Amino acid sequence: MKEKIKLAIFDFDGTLVDSEPNYDRSSDLLYEQLGISLSEDQRAGLVGISTQSFADILIRDFGLSISAAELVALSDRLYLEIARQETPIFAPMHELLQRLHKAGIRCAVASGSSQGVLDEIIDICGFGPYLSGVYSADLVKKGKPDPDIFLYTAEKLGAKPHECLVFEDSMPGIFAAHQAGIRAIAVPVEEQFAHPVFQSAWLTYPGAQNLSVKSVMYALGLPYTQHI
């Protein structure tokens, strides 16, 4: 890698933590309370976008009378009730986060989840000491696949796009990284590994649980020792 990376930007859900089962459960509860039913295609279209966009789409498509702020608050409450009980961490990503931090590369989270949800779950998972910033797409005008949240994170932490590296598991996230001019490492679920969007990333691994920390460190020109 020619450019020296100064900032590693991590998506959160599906990248650092295996939160998708929790979101599936909380979404089912949310849809039940709202009295709506979504097709598989509709559910798939809501993956990887911001919580605000998620709320806006539901209100638009189902003619809900609830406000976006109320819907976001309800969604977050239902999710946190489940996530507080258990949020599995992807061990290779946690190790990589620690190694990059030790190597002097600043690390941050840029996610579509609400700021309150991110702050609480990151604290529970113990990621805080390795992060220089945690930013929700709520802080920008447009969430992924627009590049705003990545550019915002880079600016806040004093890095130019070519000095950054994004870790993402979703198609909107990879699109956002490309639009921001930031190199990406993709960690999609295994069944999506061969998709051209994910193969367009600088490096691609079949799921965050299968990321090779050693190969990432070597690709970045960083030493890899047996112990952190």
Image (cartoon, rainbow, N blue to C red):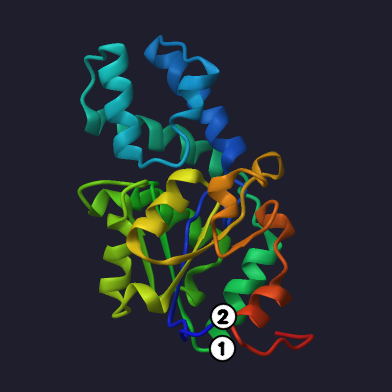
Picture quarter with the C terminus: bottom right
On the image, the x and y values in percent for residue 23 come to 53, 35
Please name the residue shown 71% across and 44% down the image: 190
Left or right of 31: which side holds 181? left
Please name the residue shown 29% across and 64% down the image: 151
In the depicted view, which residue is nearer to us: 71 or 62? 62
Tell me, yes or no, if residue 73 can be seen here: no
Instruction: Please name the amino acid that badge 1 sits on.
Output: Ala
Q: Which residue is mark 2?
A: 100
Q: Is residue 139 above or below residue 52?
A: below
Q: Is residue 46 above or below residue 175?
A: above
Q: Is residue 109 above or below residue 59?
A: below
Q: Is residue 131 above or below residue 78?
A: below
Q: Name the mark on residue 155.
A: none
Q: CA distance from mark 1 to mark 2?
A: 5 Å
On the image, the x and y values in percent for residue 100 come to 56, 80
In the depicted view, which residue is nearer to us: 199 or 141? 199
Q: Which residue is mark 1?
A: 103
In the depicted view, which residue is nearer to us: 18 or 29? 18
Mark 1 Cα shell of 10 Å, populated few (<14), some (14-19), many (≥20): few
